[in-house]
Image (spheres, grey):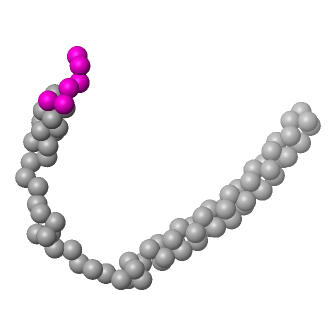
């Protein structure tokens, strides 16, 4: 099937029809807010703090696992 300009226009019209009624940009009410009021910095700080806490927990668990592996090796060696 060859893609002609008429076929392309028809495809575009079909796709646009699927969107339904579209509103004009002027009709949409949008509230303007300063960037410092979004609070994204606080969310970012929380995520960074959470990552730090996870790293501390990971280090603690790795040390505990290391002790468990050493103890297991000693017990297996004594058998």
Task: Identify the residue at horizontal 84%, vertical 46% (top origin).
Answer: 71
The single residue placed furthest to the top in the displayed view is: 1
Q: Nearer the viewer, residue 72 or 8?
A: 8
Is 66 left or right of 47, judged from the image as shown? Answer: right
Q: Is residue 56 visible?
A: yes
Q: Quadrant of the N terminus?
A: top left
Residue 28 shown in magenta: no
Above or below, 38 against 78 in this view is: below
The single residue placed furthest to the left in the displayed view is: 21
Above or below, 69 against 24 in this view is: above
Q: Nearer the viewer, residue 14 or 59?
A: 14
Q: Is residue 18 visible?
A: no
Is 73 left or right of 21, judged from the image as shown? Answer: right
User: Measured from the top left, where is residue 19 in percent x and y?
Assistant: 13, 46
> Which image quadrant for residue 25?
bottom left
Total tally of numbered discs in the picture: 0
Report the predominant secondary structure element of the magenta stretch.
loop
Task: Identify the residue at horizontal 16%, vertical 28% (top origin).
Answer: 7
User: Measured from the top left, where is residue 20 in percent x and y?
Assistant: 9, 48
Query: Magenta residues, as a range?
Result: 1-6
Is 74 left or right of 8, judged from the image as shown? Answer: right
Task: Identify the residue at horizontal 16%, vertical 73% (top origin).
Answer: 29
Q: Quadrant of the C terminus?
A: top right
Task: Identify the residue at horizontal 13%, vertical 70% (top origin).
Answer: 26
The single residue placed furthest to the right in the displayed view is: 78
């Amino acid at each position: 099937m060859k893609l002609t300009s008429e076929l392309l226009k028809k495809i575009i019209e079909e796709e646009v029809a699927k969107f339904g009624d579209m509103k004009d940009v002027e009709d949409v009410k949008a509230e303007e807010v300063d960037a410092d009021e979004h609070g994204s910095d606080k969310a970012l700080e929380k995520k960074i703090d959470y990552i730090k806490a996870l790293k501390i927990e990971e280090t603690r668990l790795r040390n505990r696992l290391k002790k468990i592996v050493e103890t297991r090796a000693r017990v297996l060696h004594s058998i």
